[in-house]
């Protein structure tokens, strides 16, 4: 239930930002896709932003954490949004794959 509420709140905020951002060139395409998924869903929401499945994965090793982080970065490449992981604006790959560049997100080391 907690995850559902977090996802719902974030989805509403993201859709609002998409609609209100005059520089967002993909607004029409994204909203059309979210509306289509919303119609296919059994709920009464106009848009569906997230997938409904939730498959928690235990990340109990450094290797597993690294594998999951790589998977997340690669999603944007596979979706065709960017050519390479370090080109995604919010990827931490910038910090790992480029010299003298820092990404937008601060990397916190977990020991």
Image (spheres, rainbow, N blue to C red):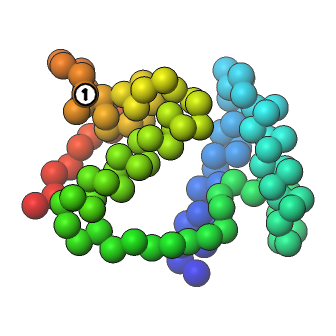
- Name the residue nearer the viewer: 101 or 97: 97
Tally the marks: 1
Determine whether, in the image, residue 39 is placed left or right of residue 85.
Answer: right
Q: Quadrant of the C terminus?
A: bottom left
Determine whether, in the image, residue 32 is placed left or right of residue 93.
Answer: right
The image shows residue 38 at horizontal and vertical percentages of: 83, 58
Is 58 rendered above or below residue 38? below
Image point (41%, 49%), residue name: 71
- Name the residue nearer the viewer: 27 or 67: 67
Q: Quadrant of the N terminus?
A: bottom right
Q: Residues within 10 Å of mark 1 (few under 14, many from 20)?
A: few
Determine whether, in the image, residue 23 is placed left or right of residue 91.
Answer: right
Q: Residue furthest left?
A: 111
Is 55 rendered above or below residue 85? below
Q: Residue furthest bottom?
A: 1
The image shows residue 68 at horizontal and vertical percentages of: 36, 56
Specify whether residue 19 is in view: no
The image shows residue 35 at horizontal and vertical percentages of: 84, 50
Image point (85%, 72%), residue name: 42
Residue of label 1: 97
Image point (72%, 28%), residue name: 26
The image shows residue 81 at horizontal and vertical percentages of: 57, 30
Mark 1 residue element: helix
Specify whether residue 86 is in view: yes
Image point (18%, 60%), residue name: 62
């Amino acid at each position: 239930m907690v995850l559902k509420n977090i996802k719902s709140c974030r989805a509403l905020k993201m859709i609002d930002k998409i609609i209100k951002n005059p520089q967002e060139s993909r607004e029409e395409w994204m909203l059309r896709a979210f509306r289509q998924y919303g119609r296919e869903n059994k709920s009464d929401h106009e848009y569906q932003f997230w997938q409904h499945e939730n498959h928690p994965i235990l990340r109990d090793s450094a290797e597993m954490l690294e594998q999951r982080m790589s998977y997340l970065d690669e999603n944007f490449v596979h979706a065709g949004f960017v050519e390479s992981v370090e080109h995604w604006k919010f990827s931490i790959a910038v910090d790992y794959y480029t010299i003298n560049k820092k990404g937008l997100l601060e990397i916190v080391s977990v020991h």
